[in-house]
Image (cartoon, rainbow, N blue to C red):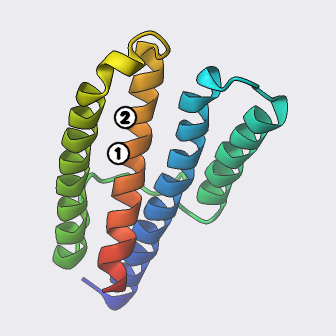
Amino acid sequence: MSNYAIKSEEKFMGQNAWFSLFMEFTLLIISVYPILNQTSTPLLLLGTIAFLGSFFMFVIRGGFTWKMKYHLTYKDEYLNTIDTIAYKHVVLGLLFSLGGVYLFSDDLALSVSHSMMATFYLAVMSLIYGASILWQSKG
């Protein structure tokens, strides 16, 4: 594998991590928005702008190009290991968040819907994936 291909995969992995973090921010706003006492249009607008901005930044910077075929694994073994460890972190984080929600389920049962919890779990998974990739690539 050429050095240029490895660098482009590293760039793509970094973009995936940042996109995941922006997606987490957006999903967290969407999941918390219905239970706020004073809902505001600017908060919902901010979440929408954050999602659209991060999505278009990702598309423009080369995350999705028409010529590129999307592969589920990276060709570089080191990057593939980072990705696999990040998914392991996601599973552990999801298990801990499910356990925490189970412990506090009596307080949450009346005010939280299933769709809000599903969106919250997606936000947790996006946060952990993005943070894990950034943490591993810096070290």
- Is 117 placed left or right of 34 in the picture? left
Could you tell me the amino acid type at mark 1? Met
Is residue 117 visible to us here?
yes
Q: Position of residue 61 (x, y in %)?
A: 62, 66
- In this rendering, the answer to whether 4 lies above or below 83 is below
Question: Residue 138 at x, y = what percent?
Answer: 37, 84
- Is disc 2 placed on a helix, strand or loop? helix
Q: Amino acid at mark 2?
A: Tyr
State the image coordinates of residue 25 (x, y, percent, origin top left): 57, 48
Give the residue drawn at x 38%, y 13%.
109
Q: Residue at x 18, y 49 (%)?
A: 92
Left or right of 99: which side holds 42?
A: right
Tell me the crowding category of disc 2: few under 14, some 14 to 19, or many 20 or more residues within 10 angstroms, Cα based.
many
- Name the residue: 61% across, 37% down: 29
Q: Compared with residue 14, is residue 60 higher up or lower down, i.e. above or below? A: above
Closer to us: 80 or 33: 33
Q: Residues within 10 Å of mark 1 (few under 14, many from 20)?
A: many
The residue that disc 1 covers is 125
Tag 1, which secondary structure? helix
- The residue labelled by disc 2 is 121
The span from disc 2 to disc 1 (Cα, nearest Å) is 6 Å
Q: From this view, report whether residue 114 is shown above or below residue 27.
A: above
Q: Identify the mark at residue 89; answer none if there is no mark.
A: none
> Residue 29 versus residue 72: which sits nearer the camera?
29
Q: Are marks 2 and 1 in contact (CB under 8 Å)?
A: yes
Question: Quadrant where the C terminus lies?
Answer: bottom left
Instruction: Please report the residue visible at 38 percent of the width from the left and 76 percent of the height from the top.
Output: 10
